[in-house]
Image (tube, grey):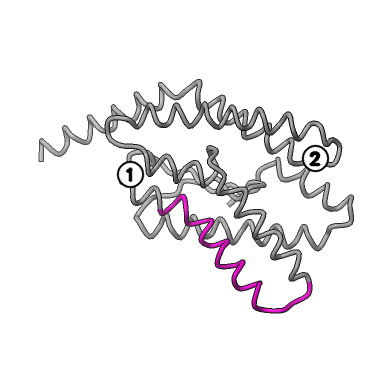
């Protein structure tokens, strides 16, 4: 696992505002969330190349993820939110100092990650549910455009609440950049998937 540099402004914001305890709780929550994704990936036999802790959870690099069965991709996408939901249940029934903050963090992570926006877990899960063999490219393209639109609107709204909204505006801008890049290069990803599938079919026929 590694930490993404975008976490720095979030943690600095918490430190400057006196939220050292919140910093620790957030970090533990992000690790737990990402452990859920890792456990789900390994349970279905997916090989995880790398894992990066992001402000919204984490980002797994899984080779040929889009070629995996729908059920496996759905399970991996929901692994993080399920882990966060489990942690929310635990911290809700076990009293401890900072309990209210911990509950708030889990609720915020769940709400954020289940938004129908790529590459968040909600967007990944919806893509896995809607994608079929013949429409995968169209569904992915639609969700990228859908995500770009929502993030542009969200960024404009967040900009009106500066400077308090700065960490969230940075996160929204980062997600927007990710989606724009993915949309620009989506054809290359499609060509790669087709080559991998074609090579697999040839190998199966030769066996």
Residue at 67% across, 47% down: 55
Counting from the top left corner in percent of width and height, residue 45 is at 34, 55
Identify the secondary structure beneath mark 1.
Answer: loop
Identify the secondary structure beneath mark 2.
Answer: loop
Eyeballing the image, is 40 above or below 134? below
Q: Which residue is mark 2?
A: 165
Residue 21 falls left or right of residue 140: right
Marks counted in the figure total 2
* Dominant SS type (magenta): helix
Residue at 66% across, 43% down: 4
Q: Residues within 10 Å of mark 2 (few under 14, many from 20)?
A: some
Residue 64 appears in the picture as rendered: no
Region rendered in magenta? 75-97
Q: Residues within 10 Å of mark 1 (few under 14, many from 20)?
A: some
Residue at 57% across, 58% down: 33
Counting from the top left corner in percent of width and height, residue 15 is at 85, 53
Residue at 71% across, 61% down: 104
């Amino acid at each position: 696992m590694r930490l993404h540099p975008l976490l720095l402004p979030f943690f600095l914001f918490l430190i400057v505002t006196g939220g050292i305890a919140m910093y620790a709780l957030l970090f533990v929550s992000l690790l737990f969330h990402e452990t859920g994704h890792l456990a789900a990936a390994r349970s279905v036999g997916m090989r995880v190349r790398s894992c990066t802790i992001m402000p919204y959870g984490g980002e797994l690099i899984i080779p040929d993820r889009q070629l995996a069965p729908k059920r496996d991709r759905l399970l991996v996408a929901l692994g993080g939110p399920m882990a966060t939901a489990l942690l929310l249940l635990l911290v809700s029934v076990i009293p401890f100092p900072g309990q209210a903050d911990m509950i708030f963090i889990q609720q915020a992570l769940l709400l954020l990650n289940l938004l129908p926006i790529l590459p968040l877990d909600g967007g990944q899960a919806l893509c896995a549910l809607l994608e079929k063999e013949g429409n995968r490219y169209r569904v992915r393209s639609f969700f990228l455009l859908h995500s770009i639109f929502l993030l542009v609107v969200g960024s404009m709204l967040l900009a009106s609440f500066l400077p308090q909204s700065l960490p969230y505006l940075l996160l929204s801008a980062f997600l927007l950049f990710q989606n724009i890049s993915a949309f620009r290069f989506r054809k290359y990803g499609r060509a790669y998937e087709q080559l991998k599938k074609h090579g697999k079919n040839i190998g199966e026929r030769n066996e």
